[in-house]
Amino acid sequence: MAPLVDPFGRAITYLRISVTDRCDLRCVYCMAEDMTFLPKRDLLTLEELDRLAGAFVRAGTRKLRITGGEPLVRREVMSLFERLGTRLGHGLDELTLTTNGTQLARHAAALRAAGVRRVNVSLDTLDRDRFAAITRWGRIEQVLDGIAAAKAAGLAIKINAVALKGVNEDEFDRMLEWCGEEGLDLCLIETMPMGEVADRSDQYLPLSLVRSRLRRRWTLAETDYRTGGPARYYTVAETGRRIGFITPMTHNFCESCNRVRLTCTGTLYMCLGQDDQADLRAVLRSGVDDAGLDAALRAAIARKPKGHDFIIDRTNRPAVGRHMSVTGG
């Protein structure tokens, strides 16, 4: 099958699949405090998610990342990992996970057995009280236990931290040091104007500034290391680990975008920062065969835009209205 190529010549080799919009935390930059979640009938079944993933793999997708909400709170989600894992070495190169870490202690060994080798853990602070404030009710000990279990299972771990001005900007030296001690990579992410949550203009912290501050203490050497996503990595000479920067605001990564995002309802977003979408649930449930499903994927990718329109301003309006948890990051 010919690969999926968008109108700008970019091959789609990376699919992020949100398996649920639910989460056991309420991070302030991701969700409203009083979220209304989707009724279960609106979600794709695990079998439907597996079928869509298979169609993408047939069309040249080499990497699948499972996201949420918090993916590990979905019932029977490990059966999906097991199904997807059978495609490794048969068109699929990598199966990965982004998680808040709260359920990792329960599932780390099974994830490794299913073929997962790397996980991203979202952790914005190492301070117990600050963690509770950012997540609204989370316990950092639960996440740290999950990270320990993932390490014991042999999973490589990257810590994802959203850089928030006036919230955690005094912690990045400590986090980089801690990641070095624990043998973890760190990735910092600029906050993005998504979802009907508080105005983000006062939280926005450009990572160009963070990087210059870090260089006062750390030696950051450019590297060509890539994981298939948008992060640009540096090796930290003092620890031997890596730090990545995801900069949708100060330096967007649209020119090399190789990914699309599938929500738990079967909506395909061709761009994180645009509202154009394709309803693949309707296609699936129409009884279409594999050829028809493949055609629907091609029609969607043919509408992939050149880039997003993220702008942080003081109008208190998000660039897109959906919460990050709906799209899956």
Image (tube, rainbow, N blue to C red):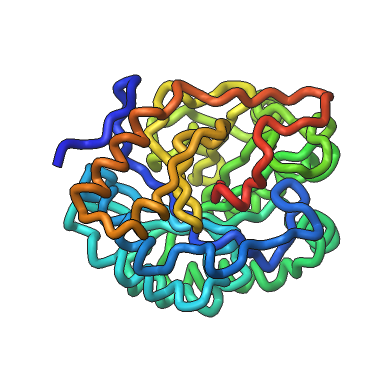
Image vertical order of residue 84 relative to residue 311, above or below: below
Percent across and percent down for residue 246 are 56, 34
Residue drawn at point x = 78 percent, y = 23 percent: 313
Q: Is residue 39 left or right of residue 155?
A: right
Q: Can residue 182 be seen in this view?
A: no
Query: Looking at the image, which residue sits at the far left?
Result: 1
Q: Is residue 62 left or right of residue 42?
A: left
Image vertical order of residue 220 relative to residue 93, above or below: above
Residue drawn at point x = 45 percent, y = 63 percent: 44
| Of the pair 201 and 146, the residue shown nearer to us | 201
| Of the pair 263 and 248, the residue shown nearer to us | 263
Residue drawn at point x = 62 percent, y = 35 percent: 218
Residue drawn at point x = 79 percent, y = 35 percent: 200
Percent across and percent down for residue 7 are 33, 22
Q: Can residue 175 be seen in this view?
A: yes
Query: Looking at the image, which residue sits at the far front?
Result: 286
Q: In this view, does 200 lie to the left or right of 55?
A: right
* Number of numbered labels in the structure image: 0
Percent across and percent down for residue 64 are 37, 52
Locate residue 1: give its quadrant: top left
